[in-house]
Amino acid sequence: MRLSGISPESTVDGPGLRFVIFTQGCPHGCKGCHNPESWPIDGGKEFTTKEIIRMLRKEAKTKKGITLSGGEPFLQSAELVEVARAARDLGLDVVCYTGYTYEELMAESDPDKLALLDLCHILIDGKYHHEQRDISLRFCGSANQRVIDVPETKKQNKIVKFGV
């Protein structure tokens, strides 16, 4: 898998202390993106899922969860399914940032994308809209983005925002 970087400790990319994986490659090209170096699909550095899982095992005792960010994580969903499953097996929660909406992901026919969505506890969805930038928002950058509680959304069959 291609990554633009890894942050072993973050408190801004989801609740609690987190291990953050920044994927490489993004089709969205959002104006004002804080990580445009992650856009080229051929940029970044190659990692195996085994390497990432090994890092997670070392970090798991001190972390609440992992965050999948980008780039666009759903471009590498097959590999991230393995990583997310390992994280959950280690007792970590999974947060994922995506430029796609929850509804777009649910309409997918790709089983890996659907599996990755199923493994998420929290999904921050929607493209970043610079004209709707709001620094007061928790875990997202623009007012159109939603912080979705995925298990509750699936259970209630309607969008349920995290922490509401």
Image (cartoon, rainbow, N blue to C red):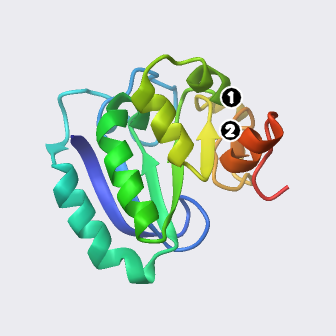
Q: Which mark is residue 164?
A: none
Quadrant location, the N terminus = top left
The crowding category of the residue bearing disc 1, from other C-alpha atoms within 10 Å (few below 14, some 14 to 19, many at least 20), is few
Dot placed on the residue nearer the N-terminal end, 1 or 2 = 1
Residue 101 visible, this angle: yes
The amino acid marked with disc number 2 is Ser
**Dot 2 crowding, Cα within 10 Å, few <14, some 14–19, many 20+:** some
Residue 159 horizontal side relative to residue 12, left or right: right
What residue lies at 50% left-to-right and 26% top-to-bottom?
30
Q: Which is more toward the observer, 155 or 122?
A: 155
Question: Which quadrant holds residue 150?
Answer: top right
The residue under label 1 is which amino acid type?
Answer: Glu
Residue at horizontal 62%, vertical 43%?
A: 124
Per the image, the residue denoted by label 2 is 142
Relative depth, front residue between 107 and 142 = 107
Q: Which of 23 and 109 is in front in this view?
A: 109
Residue drawn at (17%, 59%) of the image? 51
Query: Residue 131 — which label?
Result: 1
Give the percent coordinates (x, y) of residue 120: 55, 48
Does dot 2 land on a helix, a strand or a loop? loop
Q: List x then y, in percent, for residue 122.
A: 62, 51
Contact (Cβ within 8 Å) of mark 1 with mark 2:
yes
In the rendered image, residue 114, in percent from the top left (x then y), is placed at: 50, 31
Q: Give the mark toward the camera: 1 or 2.
A: 2
